């Protein structure tokens, strides 16, 4: 598959690295690919080598180590890694999002929400941060805030169905339900190629609708 081809090319690129900075870049990308193919131990080895090469630790190295620890099920070390990422760069948005996701897994909802709010403040054009923040507001029953956030997402990604789907959910959850608006949003999502799948149906079930 394409991922296996990419892994092979990156492994070959290690032999072509001109200096330590080049090597750390290749290893960081290689580690991210290992995460994608669900090989967190291999990913961790690459990220740790990055820190041996560049011990001052760019924020993305620590963030990626956190992702590997998360895949390995070690939430404490994942948390420590995300915090170190933010210590290295307080403006690094992915670490705020990943730490926010971790807080949600720990049922520390308000802390997680504040982290996503900070991510959106730092980068208002980050669609993933916007989606995460909207889903947080939705899960907390703050439908006005959720709707506004998903409208911002739609402005960022007008040709993707996700924002319209969650706007439909907000419309259905509002008291009284705004069924015409929900129908309009779902029609737009369908026009953009959306079909109900297990993941979205699970989201609907989770929020009780």
Image (spheres, rainbow, N blue to C red):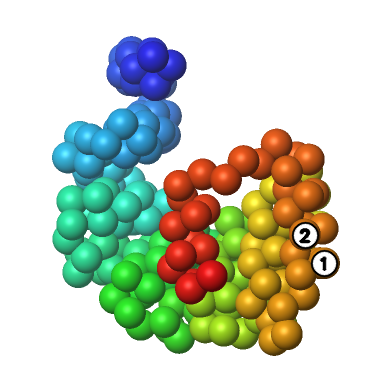
54 up-or-down from 1: above or below: below
| The image quarter in which residue 29 lies | top left
Provide the residue designation for mark 2: 183
207 up-or-down from 163: above or below: below
Secondary structure of residue under mark 2: helix
Would you call the spot at circle 2 few (<14 residues within 10 Å), some (14-19), or many (20 or more)? some
| 51 left or right, relative to 141 | left
Report the quarter where the C terminus lies: bottom right
- Residue 139 placed where, x, y %? 51, 77
| The image quarter in which residue 173 lies | bottom right
What residue is shown at x 62% (from left), y 41% (from top)?
195
Q: Nearer the viewer, residue 153 or 204?
A: 204
- Residue 83 placed where, x, y %? 35, 70
Provide the residue designation for mark 1: 180
Would you call the spot at circle 1 few (<14 residues within 10 Å), some (14-19), or many (20 or more)? few
What residue is shown at x 22% (from left), y 54% (from top)?
69
Q: Badges 1 and 2: C-beta atoms under 8 Å apart?
A: yes
């Amino acid at each position: 598959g394409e991922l296996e081809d990419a892994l092979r090319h990156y492994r070959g690129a290690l032999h072509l690295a001109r200096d330590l900075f080049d090597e750390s870049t290749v290893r960081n990308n290689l580690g991210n690919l290992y995460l994608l193919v669900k090989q967190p131990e291999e990913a961790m080895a690459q990220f740790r080598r990055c820190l041996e090469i560049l011990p001052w630790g760019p924020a993305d190295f620590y963030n990626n180590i956190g992702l590997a620890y998360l895949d390995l099920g070690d939430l404490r070390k994942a948390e420590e890694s995300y915090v170190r990422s933010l210590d290295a760069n307080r403006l690094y948005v992915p670490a705020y999002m990943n730490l926010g996701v971790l807080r949600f897994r720990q049922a520390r909802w308000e802390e997680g929400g504040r982290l996503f709010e900070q991510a959106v403040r730092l980068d208002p054009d980050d669609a993933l941060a916007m989606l995460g923040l909207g889903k947080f507001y939705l899960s907390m029953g703050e439908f006005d805030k959720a709707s506004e956030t998903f409208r911002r997402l739609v402005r960022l990604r007008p040709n993707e169905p996700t924002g319209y789907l969650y706007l439909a959910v907000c419309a259905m959850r509002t008291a009284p339900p705004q069924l015409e608006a929900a129908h309009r949003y779902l029609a737009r999502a369908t026009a953009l190629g959306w079909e109900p799948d297990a993941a979205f149906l699970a989201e609907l079930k989770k929020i009780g609708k």
